[in-house]
Image (spheres, rainbow, N blue to C red):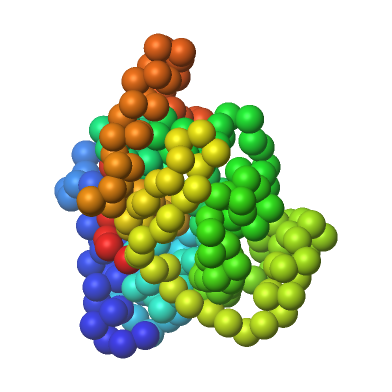
Amino acid sequence: MRADQKLELARFLRSCRARLRPEDVGLARGRRRRTPGLRREEVAQLAGISVEWYKWLEQARDVRASVQTLQRIGHALRLEPAEIRHLLLLSDHRPDEHWPLAEAQGVSRRLQRVLDELLPCPAYVHGRRWDVLAWNKAASLVLGDFTTLSGVERNCLYMGLIGPLRDMIPEWEDHAKGLVAAFRADYARYRGEPLFDELISVLLQESPEFARWWSEPNVRGWRDGTKLFHHPTLGELVFEHSGFDLADERLNSLRLVIMQPAEETNTRARLISALQVSECDVSDDNGSSTVLDRPNGHDTEPSARRL
């Protein structure tokens, strides 16, 4: 660790300790305290480490803490996931390598409202394994009824290789090859994770094309672009795809995908007409699979950056 990192880590730990009260962590306040916050020995006790060793961290001494120790300190200081991530980065650890991988099960109510406000543009959010977590009504009309899908069936890669999208995209092979190459780039961060291995195993069994392309070393990043669909009920649709990375306080890697109807086509008009019919048929569908309430009672919106 560089000297400036050690100093920043020390300042961060002292600041986090100062903002806590003993009663926040289940300790008695006891006698009057000269300074606000917990004492060093209280943090060390809660984290299960020696007082002397924790003191060295706050003094920017030349010590290196393991990921497990830093996580225990983070929990003792009641840090939020993003703060624990910062703690690990300051200590020269890569959080993504050590954070337990668990695919998100839904999105915040606020993010679901964002999806709904994007109508008539189809829009959806997928997680790090590319499982679709939330969508709006337009996405259901174009891509299929997500509520009827579960497990790997609701995965973007699976849907693009095996699902009905295969028959809707004229230049399907080029599209599918690009999907596999982009997925490989994401997979490199999570190689060996059971969630990813499960999906790859299914695709290897059910898609000969995937088995062939997966054996090739092609890699690419996400690409915005224009896509043509021959939809079985809506006819010819042309969309301009855009992707945005999202990161929420649980450290889930989410991506928002927006399919904007291309200009000088009748795609928007067809979507609006189909949505009006859908409104008459289904009046109580909010478009989302699962909307999560935040555990701390706050509906924190993820931050976004353009891919």
Residue 251 x/y as whole percent: 43, 54
Residue 202 x/y as whole percent: 77, 56
Which residue lies at the image location 72% right of the left edge and 68% below the top edge? Answer: 209
Residue farthest toward the bottom in the current orientation of the protein: 2
Residue 184 appears in view: yes
Query: 188 above or below 267?
Result: below
Q: Which of the two residues, 46 or 91, is positioned nearer the viewer here?
A: 91
Q: Which of the two residues, 216 or 254, is positioned nearer the viewer here?
A: 216
Residue 79 appears in view: no
Horizontal side of 160 relative to 8 (left or right) equals right
Which residue lies at the image location 74% right of the left edge and 75% below the top edge? Answer: 212
Q: Which of the two residues, 12 or 108, is positioned nearer the viewer here?
A: 108
The image shows a total of numbered marks equal to 0
Residue 246 x/y as whole percent: 35, 54
Which residue lies at the image location 24% right of the left edge and 83% below the top edge? Answer: 4
Quarter the C terminus occupies: bottom left
Which residue lies at the image location 62% right of the left edge and 84% below the top edge? Answer: 217
Horizontal side of 216 relative to 302 (left or right) equals right
Residue 115 x/y as whole percent: 33, 37
Query: 12 above or below 247?
Result: below
Q: Which of the two residues, 196 or 178, is positioned nearer the viewer here?
A: 178
Residue farthest toward the right in the current orientation of the protein: 205
Horizontal side of 56 relative to 303 (left or right) equals right
Quarter the N terminus occupies: bottom left
